[in-house]
Amino acid sequence: MAKEVGNWTEASEELDAIVASFDEGDVTVDDLIAKLERATVIIEALEERLDATRGKVEELTPRIARGDDNA
């Protein structure tokens, strides 16, 4: 089972560390697949959070606009 992703900051920091290890050549062939799989899990989780946030903003924006009109 994949390790939980954590909050946005933790997830993006972990993803940055994975990318840095690739950039620095610190990944062994044995670790390559595991790191790629983990990076994929993190990216998918962050994309889901962005989609959820976008949906919530789209839901709340009209309510905020109506509130401004009533002021």
Image: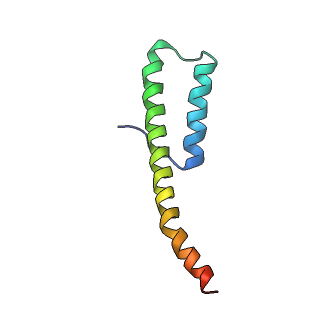
Q: What residue do we see at 44% from left, 15% from top? A: 30
64 relative to 8, above or below: below
Question: At x 57% / y 36%, what residue is drawn?
Answer: 14
Q: Which quarter of the figure has residue 4?
A: top left
The location of residue 11, given as percent across then percent down, is: 54, 42
* Of residues 32 and 45, the one drawn nearer to the viewer in this rendering: 45
- Give left or right: position of 14 versus 32: right
Look at 45% across and 44% down and name the residue there.
Answer: 45
In this orientation, which residue lies closer to the viewer: 30 or 62?
62
Instruction: Report the number of discs.
Output: 0
Q: Position of residue 15 (x, y in %)?
A: 56, 35
Determine whether 37 is above or below 57 in the image: above
- Where residue 70 sits in the image (x, y, percent)? 60, 86
Colour approach in the figure: rainbow
The answer to whether 17 is drawn above or below residue 11 in the figure is above
**Up-down relation of residue 33 to residue 49 (above or below):** above
Which quarter of the figure is the N terminus placed in? top left
Residue farthest toward the front in the current orientation of the protein: 69
Give the residue furthest to the left.
1
Apparent side of residue 40 relative to residue 24 in the rendered image (left or right): left
The C terminus lies in which quarter of the figure? bottom right
State the residue lying farthest toward the top.
29
**Residue 64, horizontal then vertical, whole percent:** 57, 75
